[in-house]
Amino acid sequence: MAIEEEMVAGEGTAVTANQTTNDTEAFENKLRPTDFSGYIGQGEVKQNLQVFLTAAKNRGEVLDHTVFYGPPGLGKTTLAMILADSMKTQLRVTSGPALEKPGDLASILSNLQEGDFLFIDEIHRLRMPVEEILYTAMEDFAIDLVIGKGPSARTMRLNVPRFTLVGATTQFSKLSNPLRDRFGHVEKLRFYEDGEIGQIITRSAGILEIKIDSEATEILARCCRRTPRIANRLLRRMRDFAEVVHDGKITKKVVIESLKNLSIDVQGLDFSDQEYLKTLCEKFNGGPAGLSTLAAAIGEDEATIEDVIEPFLIREGFMQKTPRGRMATDTAFMHLGLSELS
Ligand SMILES: Nc1ncnc2c1ncn2[C@@H]1O[C@H](COP(=O)(O)OP(=O)(O)OP(=O)(O)O)[C@@H](O)[C@H]1O
Ligand SMILES: [Mg+2]
């Protein structure tokens, strides 16, 4: 599979706590499963996609446009790559913010080969004039170009090869209705079970030739916020501690000590999560507190809070979003060892 990077995904965008940096990118690619069998969990999504792929292949058609949504690090980009690989076609990679002008997208579309996959990461961040080009491209495999300016301007329709658009977003609700309606398949990725994260750790440890025992894997799996990217990142940190401070093997003792050094608690809450919850519980008496107020109080940007911190805290029952603002639950107070203030 050839991957042509139009631009590094995420460039020019707010860097969030979970986003890849150049340092981790090489590892991410090394650990990325390249087929469905290596892709752990997300059973329903995988099953559906395999049916749709087989159906499209048997009919000699391209796969219908597909969008993946869910919090960062759950495997959206990985799935897009697996799709292109299983159709044995090229995947062109770009992202919403990278496409500044309609012409940028038009040139990518007209350079596609029949059956190619076009992956647009952060598709909710497409600019409207660019998004409008996509509408006819997705529906009619054609783009309308405006040639000239002023009264002499005319529109020319240009056919583009049949392709599959794969979109990925952490904020599905921000997709406009016309764009959302043009996707044939909408797949939501969910947080992973601890057992699945354990399997991912074992798989990654095998690839990176890291020694880790089953007890250590089990404890570590519970602290990865149910997210593969975090599992891979923590595994590498555990290896650092195991190699430098211990005898090289990751054991229960290494995991417990290292997590403490990294300020990660038993349920995988990292420093930012703990700070968020402490602020909500202690400073705001459990809420309700507005997003912008909380963001200012902990010095984090609103997008990071909404996309990275909150989905996991909500999923784990530590807080709720209500029309009046964010509210901590009893679970949060218990976790922090505070009794609810009245
Ligand atoms: N189901 C899975 N099985 C094994 N490894 C996985 C799985 N999902 C993700 N990973 C690993 O986690 C890393 C992050 O996945 P990926 O880049 O696909 O996430 P993403 O959803 O695209 O995140 P973002 O929203 O930040 O772009 C990958 O390098 C891959 O190795
Ligand atoms: Mg991605």
Image (tube, rainbow, N blue to C red):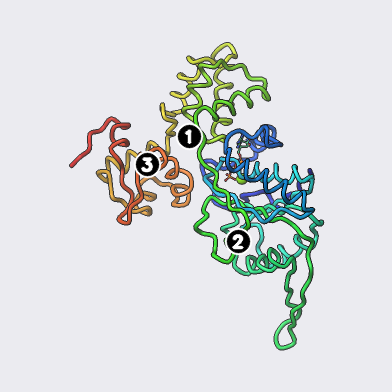
Q: Earlier in the sequence, mark 2 or mark 1?
A: 2
Q: Earlier in the sequence, mark 3 or mark 1?
A: 1
Provide residue 74's location: percent of width, then percent of height: 56, 40
**What amino acid type is highlighted by mark number 1?**
Arg
Q: Mark 2: which secondary structure?
A: loop
Q: Which mark is residue 126?
A: 2
Judge from the rendering whether residue 214 lies leftward or rightward of residue 264; answer left or right.
right
Local crowd at mark 1 within 10 Å, few (<14), some, or many (≥20)?
A: many
For image coordinates 45% across by 19% down, the residue present is: 256
**What amino acid type is highlighted by mark number 3?**
Tyr
Label 3, ligand 1: CB separation under 8 Å: no
Q: Earlier in the sequence, mark 3 or mark 2?
A: 2
For image coordinates 63% across by 19% down, the residue present is: 210
Give the residue at mark 1: 225
Asked if residue 56 is positioned above or below residue 210 in the image, the reply reads below
Q: Which quarter holds ligand 1?
A: top right
Res. 47 image quadrant: top right
**Quadrant into which the N terminus falls:** top right
From the viewer's perspective, is the residue at label 3 or at label 1 nearer? 1
Judge from the rendering whether residue 130 lies leftward or rightward of residue 195; answer left or right.
right
Q: Mark 3: which secondary structure?
A: helix
For image coordinates 67% across by 24% down, the residue present is: 208
For image coordinates 50% across by 24% down, the residue present is: 220
Determine if residue 244 is in view.
Answer: no
Q: Which mark is residue 276?
A: 3
**What amino acid type is highlighted by mark number 2?**
Leu
- Name the residue nearer the viewer: 247 or 317: 317
Q: Residue furthest bottom?
A: 151
Asked whether the beta carbons under mark 3 and mark 1 sit within 8 Å of each other, the answer is: no
